[in-house]
Amino acid sequence: MHKKYFIIIQIVLCLASLLAQGQSVTSIDPSSRKSSLQLRRSGEETAGRNLSGTYYSINPDEYIIDSGDELFIKVDVPGPELKTYSVKVSSDGYLFIPDAPGIYIRGLILNDAKKLILAHLKKHFPNSEIEVYFDKIYFRRSGEETAGRNLSGTYYSINPDEYIIDSGDELFIKVDFPGPEFKTYSVKVSSDGYLFISDAPGIYIRGFSVNIAKKKVSTHLKKHFSNAVIEVYFDKIHPIQVYLTGALNRFDDVNLNSGNRLYDAIEPIISTYENDTLLIPQLQIASLRNVKLLRKTESLSCDILKFRVTGSAKENPYLMDNDIIHIPFKDTTGGLISIEGLVGKPITFEFKPGDKLQNAVDIAGGMLPSADSNHIMIYRFNRDRDDFRLITLQFPSEKEFQLIQDDRIYIRRKPLYHSRASVWVKGEVIYPGVYPIVDNQTTLSEIIDQAGGFTPYVNLKMSRVVREDSIPGEDDLERMIDAFPVGMTRIERNYWTSSTKGNLDVVSCEFSKLFNDKDIDQDIILRNDDIIEIGSDKRYIYVSGAIIRPGIIKFNPDWTYLDYIASADGFKERAKKKEVKLIKFDTENWLDADKGYAIDPGDRLFVPHKYEYDMSELALRALSIVSQVTTVLLVVKSFGL
């Protein structure tokens, strides 16, 4: 009965947790997430608010001018005449007023832009007092939510060499005749692609980039206003609608504007799949390297993965009205490339025909400064077999090397590149601590000099250098530490659990000969992680294991091992009193303490605990023995012995 109530309580708590997180316990349908994706694109809720022309406190030495920003200009000409202009930066980056030519200011720091405008207008109003103020910012530049709103006549920062003119785009044209007369026109591209003004024939400009279209319009109008100065500006973009199809579940039509690029449309969908564990498998079968952008007159193939890691604008074109974004299925049966080692982000990614070594390096975030670009290794399978061959390349001289599916790329570290090798100096030196070294090059005497030399209490005979990577098996301690605990003897396992000393091995070096007799043959070359222990005349014995108070005890030449243990308050209840070990400081040899060996300063006494049998280990060993005996019996029987 209690179990039944417990299960009910668990279910209630689980449901409460889900409701607190605002999640549904029904099945997940990507098409039902439209509102959340739209908000993610903007980072803030703006529906129903007009953010065009918003006052906001900014730093004029940091703020960067962009399309849609609004400035207020005052021109005080001699006499009673006064002119004021409230003007916005156009989508192609220009600021223009009716009485003067336009000036490009997008991308400039605000204070620099104001100085440039002042100097520009002074040329056209030489006797006037000119004031320039930054009035309002334009929030739509951040990409806020626009679904359901009329985006006609929207300012948006675009690249005039890439952006393609389409129906609904708005241009501003100024025709400045000789004398005081001038005319201005704010005109939109018609549904059939034409731009026309009342005083001149129309001209077809849809499908051209902004810069090419502006030149065509200017040349066209020059024929009709031969004596006038023509200025053409791309002012505002237009709303578009695109469609999503393919491997990822159709999300619905996406409302965007013509200043958006391909990634603006699909990033919300990718984010949803990446952040939902139930949808990740669907994302993994989508080919983000072969996204198709289908439009009226052409079909583009775009590598979204490459764009995400390199920012290549070529893989992220501007969208146009009625574009179809098709995300195909990935070939999951093979066709992968992996790159590992010294790159920004080791990765396994989808192979795309035509991939070169440069593509793989770019997708992996480039090589790190420590990468050995002269020895790039590519492991390539031999046809349909499991074996492979090694190809060694240099980069960038062989960056055009063609990859094939299932190539594996490894980039190694440069030998000794900015090695972070160091040694630890402890004991009787002026400045103990960690010191950087050049591995296999810095000498012992150099480090002692850096450590300030020895203190007055130094004992060179008790000094030593210990190293972690000495030859295996040279002494009992090294053998014990290298072994897996299951394979240790009982005493060794006790020491494993109670010892604070690492897998150290003494390096042959006589400190007194080096520092007293100046014998340079004793000046050993240091290695990374060496420990330099400088002995002290303050003589001690180290006691550990199954004793009441393990620690350091002052050396007494007249004491036996039992005296030191008594000084540490004696044995613990489970101590193995007859198996006490004496570990010599200078050799690391393990000796039986009860055999009467001399105890010297720096030596250690270790008292094992009584061994507690591990029943699972005993069972495994017993099973192994039974198996071996059974095998022998079967062999004997098969030969009729």
Image: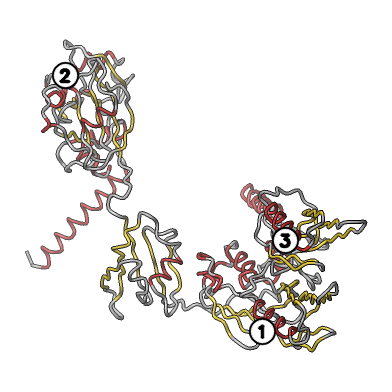
Q: Which mark is residue 599?
A: 2
Q: Nearer the viewer, residue 181 or 57?
A: 181
Labels 1 and 2: the sequence-earlier one = 1
Which residue type carries mark 3? His
Disc nearest the viewer among 2 and 3? 3
Q: Foreground: 29 or 465?
A: 465
Dot 1 or dot 3: first in sequence order is: 3
Q: Residues within 10 Å of mark 3 (few under 14, many from 20)?
A: some
Q: Is residue 428 above or below residue 309?
A: above
Residue drawn at x 79%, y 72% is 153
Observer-nearest of 170 and 546: 170
Q: Which residue is mark 3?
A: 120
Tell me which corner region of the image, top left, top right, bottom left or bottom right, holds residue 429: top left
Q: Quadrant of residue 626?
A: bottom left
Q: Is 125 placed above or below 111 here?
A: below
Q: Is residue 466 or residue 375 the one in the foreground?
A: 375
**Disc 2 versus disc 3: distance between alpha carbons?**
93 Å
Residue type pointed to by label 1: Gly
Model colouring: secondary structure
Tag 2's secondary structure?
Answer: loop
Do the numbered discs 2 and 3 sit on residues whose CB atoms are within 8 Å?
no
Kindly identify which residue carries mark 1.
207
Q: Position of residue 487 (x, y in %)?
A: 23, 44
Q: On screen, 275 above or below 355?
A: above
Q: Amino acid at mark 2?
A: Ile
Horizontal relation, residue 272 to residue 119: left or right? left
Q: In the rendered view of the protein, which quadrant contains the C terminus?
A: bottom left
- Residue found at the far left of this picture: 641
